[in-house]
Image: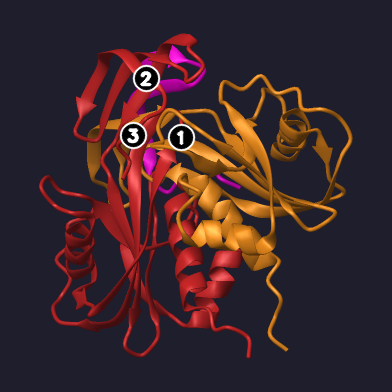
Chain colours: A orange, B red
Amino acid sequence: MLSKHLWKTLSSKMILDHSKYLMVENRTIQLPDGRVIENWPWVVTPDFVNVVAVAVDGRFLCFRQTKYALSGLSLALVGGFIDKGESPIQAVKRELLEETGYEAPEWVDLGSFRVDPNRGMAIGNLFLARGAVQVAKPTSDDLEEQELLMLSRNDIETALDRGEFKVLAWATAVALALRHMQAKCP
Amino acid sequence: MLSKHLWKTLSSKMILDHSKYLMVENRTIQLPDGRVIENWPWVVTPDFVNVVAVAVDGRFLCFRQTKYALSGLSLALVGGFIDKGESPIQAVKRELLEETGYEAPEWVDLGSFRVDPNRGMAIGNLFLARGAVQVAKPTSDDLEEQELLMLSRNDIETALDRGEFKVLAWATAVALALRHMQAKCP
């Protein structure tokens, strides 16, 4: 789906190979109108998944956690990087099981979105999972101190509107999931 | 608002100073539980603004454009980087005027969100503007070929649900703006 680029890449040189979490290339690109631009930075970070998981009782699985780039506590979603060879749906089911011990029978693809329209970075793949039930204990080795919360529909709506999901991908996924679940007015 | 970090930065070294669009630091950080992690990449890209602008006739100002990191055409929002010394609201009013020639009397702050919870990158500041009227011609010098569209409410809802806003910040802003404008069921 994200394969056809109307801008052309004329040349590319790796200028920072930090780790699997970050590589930077310096590119020369050509605009659709023919202009050439040099020194265009292209950033590669791992593609990731996030899921708004709703348990059989209708409550939403969220984390309250700290992250390095965030001030104070944030509400967060289940998610993580896509491992080599995995599809987004495989990755998100693995992350849900690892981080919460839950599995879900019903999955909705909420879309795939670029983090940065110019410098690239990752693609975030967002999902809604419904009917989730706990089948195991969490086995996550994430760095974060995190607390699993079961939020009511009203609580998660309020949290979204108050900006308590402090990261773009999390706010996007929650907003799109709530749209999907929205009851039409009679 | 984004000033208090529960994780500590023990040291930081610039490893890539590409341009005003991209700097990378290598940091040593300490988790809240005391563990120390070395070689933590910290990426600095410029903070930005986006706005869902609604004209007096109720139509939504969007662009159809190509971007280097996107495949094919995408719907996009008015937006851009915050200039030095500007507040987010000053930046977004400037961008709206430059890119479309419109001004608006009513502004809603839809929130500020981190691009990446681990490596930082930018903070995106999202707005809704209502009652927009054209007062000038656009003066933007953006690189993109872009076409200004005036979408109906129904068209923008459909475009969001079809994934036609291909960037996280744009999808977030549209979803949050539509939530804000949502009529409650009687």
In three-dimensional space, the C-alpha distance between marks 1 and 2, rounded to whole angstroms, equals: 15 Å
| Residue that label 3 marks | B4
* Residues behind callouts 1 and 3 on a single chain: yes
Residue B172 appears at what percent x and percent y? 48, 57
For the C terminus of chain A, give its image quadrant: bottom right
Give the image location of residue A182, x and y in percent: 68, 71
Amino acid on which disc 3 is placed: Lys
Residue at image mark 1: B117
Q: Chain of mark 1?
A: B
Tags 1 and 2 on a common chain: yes
- Name the disc covering residue B8, or none: 2
Mark 3 — on which chain does it sit? B
Q: Position of residue A153 (x, y in %)?
A: 68, 62
Q: Secondary structure at mark 2?
A: strand
Residue at (14% x, 52% y) in the render: B86
Span highlighted in magenta in the image: A1-26
The mark nearer the N terminus, 1 or 3, is: 3
Residue A25 lies within the magenta run: yes
Residue A127 versus residue A42 in the image, above or below: below
Q: Residue at x 19, y 34 (%)?
A: B20
